[in-house]
Image: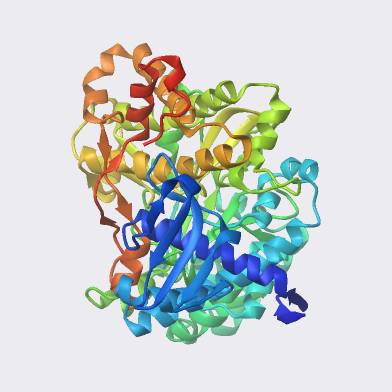
Amino acid sequence: MSLGPLPGGRPVEARLWRELNQALIARAIAELSFEEGLKPEAPDHRNGLWTLRLAEDVSYRFKAKRRIWGNLAVEPASLFRQEGALAAPVDDVARFMIDARAVLEIEPDTLAIYIKELSSTLLSDARVAAISATIGEDALIALPDHLLQQYLDGHPKAPAAKGRIGWGLADAEAYAPEFQAELRPFWVAAARDACRLSHDPAIAEEDLLSASLDPAERRRIEDACAEACRQIGMDRAGYLLLPIHPWQWDHMIAPQFANEIAAGRLLPLGLFGDGYLPQQSLRTLANARSPQALHLKLSLTILNTSAWRGVPGKYMAIGPRFSAWLAEKAAADPALAPAIVLREPAGAFYPHPLYEQIEDVPYQFREMLGVIWRESIETHLKPGQSAMMLGALTKPTSAGRPIVSALIARSGLSHEAWLERLFDAVAVPLYHFLCCYGVGFIAHGQNVTLVLDGFTPVGVALKDLQGDADLVDRDFPEAEDLGAEIKAVLLRRPAAHLQQHLQTGHFASVLRFLSDALEAHDGFPEIRFYAALARSLRRYQGAHPDMSERFALFDLFTAKVPRICINRVRLAIGYGDANRRPAPSLGTDLDNPLHLAERASAEPAGNLVGAQP
């Protein structure tokens, strides 16, 4: 039996569709309970059975285990829906959300659009499951990062991780990473006096074009540009060549910038140059012919994981200098030896001449036409090294275990030893950037790349520096050489807020799922996971006694940490246009796993393994 066409023309098998719905319901229950929107009850903790009461006579029953962050690890296959006296296995995430609507206080229009996002996510999950079934474990973990991303599942903390509002089936097949299709950018010639271009002095415009266009294509696009200029009597020197995502050209630029096109300030040229592979963020593209070439980050006005995926213009002027400053610190500071900053050597932005004049206009109308050129991690890898997006570590292989388990098994190291190398390579540099330079990265699983030597962590690459990096709201002497114009543009946040970039953006949003995967598959206790993290951080602190005041300012070992909620915000505010990206809300405080781990480590060894909250 099938349930209609799977993207790509193949049928969705009923069993797979049911399993995907169950997995998505399990994730929704887990994350919405973690954010305190749902309140499952466990009348008998001994057998791990939980009950979630929703509508008057509707409840969901399932098996789950409480993890160290207080979240539930729900067994998808155990889920049953009970209505009155009738009980049946669950198989429909939309039905679940309708059941949960009253408890979650979701407005009807918000509920309908959220279900639309979940449906899109399910279709993506089906495609990922289909291609994942065709690749063995050895081949999967050997893939370069830009290809491995085609097999990944999205942000685990967001049930609607691949909502992609604005795309249909054909768009997903053409532009989503899991469909493994190459796309070619649509190029325009943009009037220089209307465009904001910023680039590192060490890179020329010719270098930017060479990253996408071989000599033959370079000649072809120049001929097209010269002809377009000739037809309107304009000088070619007055124009800058810009790549645009082909979907963005069709759906946003052609209609919304029609006045600029008619006036000859934007000259459409067509599809040129190398094919590119979309990455997990959708708007970031890796060169398929030359993986070492600069990546393109292009505006894409679709709503995905709660935000429109445009390119803000406000960071464009400072992007190259800020990324260069970060890279210079990483290269000169021994504490940052494992860190690689993927520079953004150039950026260009074309503001819409009318939308820019509307006060408090929804932000997607101010981010429609922009491009950032970013270094590829491939240019930084040494012989024997490989890289993978940090979020890939929880991806199940065909052998049924997460990639992290496969790497540990192949490394020959114990879990503790491997994890301490991971934390030394990733968490410690992030913490040092925060404590020493006052720079806080929102280091979620898609903008942090792990560098491996063989199967062992040795480094981290940081990216998405325009918008996902903020400064502390005080002046640190170590950052006094950061230009005043850069400081004026970047957000300045209180220390407690920047600390949450690390504690929530990385620990609770990445490590929470990693520790869960290792406990679920390998039986490795989470308390030992966070004890290893605590040892790495304390070792770093011990090596820098002169920074004790900063460690007190950014204290990662407090008994409680804030609970940040992202899914409930979307369900509360709905999908109306806003002039800024939605801000998360706060729940009750969480027990800090680092504090729990250190407390457990101080107890007799026999009490360590079972020390869970």
Left or right of 417 in this view: 355: left
Q: Is residue 392 visible?
A: yes
The one of 342 and 308 positioned closer to us in this rendering: 308
| Number of disc labels | 0
Task: Give percent across and percent down for residue 557.
Answer: 30, 28
**Location of residue 387 in the rendering, given as x and y in whole percent from the top left corner:** 64, 38
Observer-nearest of 473 and 405: 405
Q: Residue furthest front?
A: 85
Image quadrant in which the N terminus is located? bottom right
Which sits in the foreground, 478 or 335?
335
Displayed quadrant of residue 132: bottom right
Q: Residue at x 61, y 79 (%)?
A: 228
Please report the residue visible at 60 percent of the width from the left and 84 percent of the height from the top.
231
Q: State which quarter of the image contains the C terminus.
A: top left
Identify which residue is drawn at 29% across, 25% down.
Answer: 478
Q: Is residue 128 above or below residue 423?
A: below
Above/below status of 175 relative to 284 = below
Q: Is residue 323 above or below residue 479?
A: below
Identify which residue is drawn at 79% across, 44% down: 139
Instruction: Name the one closer to the observer, 146 or 138.
Output: 138
Query: x, y percentage for residue 435?
Result: 30, 28
Image-based side of 342 in relation to 111, left or right: right
Q: How is the image coloured?
A: rainbow
Q: Kindly tell me whether residue 117 is visible in this rendering.
A: no
